[in-house]
Amino acid sequence: MDVEERLADYAEMTEEALQRYLPEVECLQKSVADAARYSLSAGGKRIRPVLVMEFCRVCGGEPETALPVACAIEMMHTFSLIHDDLPCMDDDDMRRGKPSCHKAFGEAAAVLAGDALAILPFQIIAEAGLKKTLSQDAALRIIKLLSELSGISGMIGGQTVDLENEGKQPPVGVILEMYRMKTGALLEFCCKAGCIAAGAGADKQLSAGSYGQRLGLAFQIVDDILDITADEKLLGKPVGSDKADGKYTYVTAVGFEKAREQARSLTAQAAELLADFEDNEFLVGLTNMLLDRQY
Amino acid sequence: MDVEERLADYAEMTEEALQRYLPEVECLQKSVADAARYSLSAGGKRIRPVLVMEFCRVCGGEPETALPVACAIEMMHTFSLIHDDLPCMDDDDMRRGKPSCHKAFGEAAAVLAGDALAILPFQIIAEAGLKKTLSQDAALRIIKLLSELSGISGMIGGQTVDLENEGKQPPVGVILEMYRMKTGALLEFCCKAGCIAAGAGADKQLSAGSYGQRLGLAFQIVDDILDITADEKLLGKPVGSDKADGKYTYVTAVGFEKAREQARSLTAQAAELLADFEDNEFLVGLTNMLLDRQY
């Protein structure tokens, strides 16, 4: 089993499905659809869709069953990137090596494209439930979970705390809680939703959710480390941009060595939780790959 | 049957439920919840919740059954107002006689509060389906409809067309299509969703949707007229603000008299569609009241 190969397969399934969900059509409001498609097709690693489909698979389901959910979470993630980059938020001109959405399409279109990508996911999951590719119960559970973990108690809450602490040096506890909401919540969603799509019970959902939380935290800490150490071309944004923003991260709070150790320890905890799933080699490989990534 | 009295009853049910769905709690991300609550409690006529609950009632359901949907659509509507007011969009400092959300809480908080209010509605409807106060099938249909009619093909599409035509004089057809998406789509949702919540069939949903579309168009045209004629204090925003923005409305396109006539004709068409529903006196009264409103 080759991790890179299966990653590429899942990514390809995702690209194809995303294009079906947001096709190029001529209409009066074409510009906002173009802006949404621009950001959505900017690539990235598609880690979230991969987690959704793979957790569905290790719970005995078909990855295709979870494909609508995989696309939904990639849209929700992209929405958050578009709005986070806005001048009134993190004010980032570049994203994944390309001009950010508001730089390419203007601020109003970027706000609206983000809005559209926050709303469309629910349509896609509801349709899967109505067409019975997902059970109605599973579709409703996944919609509820997505809304909870992207909303005020999840991702949006995390971005709020992030902005409020700009220029400040918050306690480590606040930083970690912010990461839990901002990055952990959506990864928790991916892993849990994959289990729900496969019809797995509460135990599996719990293990998957805890795995996702730990992976998310490790992922964010590695992000902070890479912001200091990575190659600018690989990273797709200026190295040290957090520092230039005056952003106080977990790395600035506890130091490089302790942060690296913490990322390793969280990754090990995450990998341990995978013992609750059979046929987990890919997930274990992916987990370690994310810790060791260079960009 | 007193129209004002029943309106007040429905509005009270909505206020109470909205407070339950967005309670005041102490947490790190309190500010975004406060901003959302600020805009949500700014009042307005609560016409959308009223339509949801009343269409549920005239289809033989209990208004309470549709209350979660009523709150959901009021949140979605409020989200659109918050984002429409942003400096990069319509740049409005006042809303319903109070400072707009970004004036009171800052631009970043307003973007995030809007985002939160676009996402929370889906959680509320999904929960109603999981608790079986709505059937699972009805909950999924309503979620799909809400996402469609608020997204790129509905409300967000309408706002896109609106912004793209700023400073231009678009053909009347474009103006009407913009109104259909921007205002008609959500009102269509309200009426249809009320029918679905009551378990009514496709025929009722169709009549209700057509009614909502016509009411929405009439509502928007009356808005344009009031922007020219209304008392500033009643309207809660400067009279003539559309004109000051250089906004070319249906009224500027066809003239005051023809617009007034069109609003009357659309209202009559809407009222005719109500014949498909029994016990429709309140809806008929409400329809005429909306045409004749002074603010």
Image (cartoon, coloured by chain):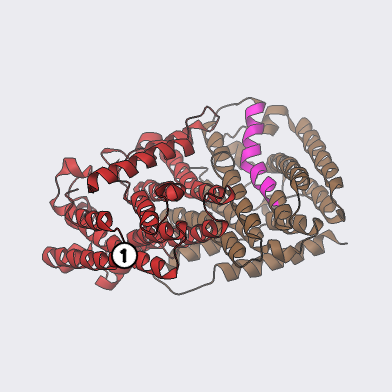
Chain colours: A red, B brown
Q: Residue furthest bottom?
A: B26
Does residue A96 appear to the left or right of B284 in the view shown? left
Residue at 70% x, 64% y: name it.
B65
| Above or below A6: residue B113 | below
Other residues around mark 1 within 10 Å, as few (<14) / some (14–19) / many (≥20): many
Does residue A227 appear to the left or right of B201 in the view shown? left
Q: Position of residue B223 (x, y in %)?
A: 69, 43
Q: Position of residue A195 (x, y in %)?
A: 42, 60
- Residue A237's quadrant in the figure? top left
Determine which residue is flagged by label 1.
A211
Q: Which residue is nearer to you in this view: B179 or A222?
A: A222
Q: Position of residue A21 (x, y in %)?
A: 48, 39
Residue A156 on the magenta span: no
The residue segment tinted magenta is B173-190
* Quarter that holds the N terminus of chain B: bottom right
| Above or below A106: residue A219 | below
Residue B175 on the magenta span: yes
> Is residue B55 visible in this depiction of the protein?
yes
Q: Amino acid at mark 1?
A: Tyr
Residue at 34% x, 39% y: name it.
A12
Does residue B91 appear to the left or right of A170 in the view shown? right
Q: Position of residue A51 (x, y in %)?
A: 34, 54
Q: Is the magenta region chiefly helix, strand or loop?
A: helix
Q: Which residue is nearer to you in this view: A233 or A50?
A: A50
- Residue A38's quadrant in the figure? top left
| Above or below A135: residue B274 | above
